[in-house]
Amino acid sequence: MADFAAEVADRLAITDKIYRYCRSVDRLDVAVGHSVFHEDSHADFGASYVGPGRGWIDYICIEHLRFLHHSHQVSNIIIEIDGDRAGSESYVTATLRRQEGDRIIQHEFWARYVDTWSKRDGDWAIDTRHCIVDYGSTREVDALPGNPRSKRDASDPSYGVLDGS
């Protein structure tokens, strides 16, 4: 029973990090994003970025400033654990909006995060991430008004209940 409980705890810890990655890029929270990747990690996002995992966080949080809004959702998380090492595949849908003159342009991507993980000093983090974009689209949209309380920083209401992480 202890092995089962440990495996469930490991799966939850990895899943939590996958979700926190999305939170980090949507709230532009570099510290949270760095916590998802080991210091010596590697990230391959194709033509847009190949390099250190934490460098990706620095890069994408700056790049996202070009957009009005962005939202990342993750599903279909499959994790295989072997001791203190693991592999995972997660499906991600990313939607980003930017202004182009009077038009609102929406970018949509359907992709997968293919990750290798290791548990070091009791903490799971990514060793290698490959982002594989399966397909995407760009189109003009008629934007609905958003909630003015939605922020891409620590002033977002979620920080009041999530202790800044």
Image (tube, rainbow, N blue to C red):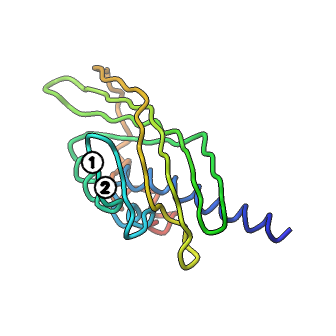
Circles 2 and 1: CB atoms closer than 8 Å: yes
> Does 21 sit left or right of 118 as displayed?
left
Q: Could you tell me which secondary element the residue under label 2 belongs to? A: helix
Q: Position of residue 11 (x, y in %)?
A: 66, 58
Q: Which residue is located at x 50 percent, y 52 percent?
A: 115
Residue 53 vs residue 88: left or right?
left
Residue 26, image x, y percentages:
38, 49
State the image coordinates of residue 127 (x, y, percent, origin top left). 45, 62
Identify residue for label 2: 56
Amino acid identity at mark 2 = Trp
Q: Nearer the viewer, residue 61 or 77?
A: 77
Q: Furthest residue to the right? A: 1
**Which of these two is toward me, 5 or 104?**
5
Q: Residue at x 37, y 29 (%)?
A: 108
Q: Quadrant of the N terminus?
A: bottom right
Q: Residue at x 54, y 66 (%)?
A: 118
Q: Nearer the viewer, residue 34 or 69?
A: 34
- The picture quadrant where one finds residue 164 is bottom left
What residue would you read off at disc 1? Answer: 49
Q: Residues within 10 Å of mark 2 (few under 14, many from 20)?
A: many
Q: Is residue 26 above or below residue 126?
A: above
Q: Is residue 79 above or below residue 92?
A: below
Question: Mark 1: which secondary structure?
Answer: loop
Gap between marks 2 and 1, in whole Å?
7 Å
Residue type for callout 1:
Tyr
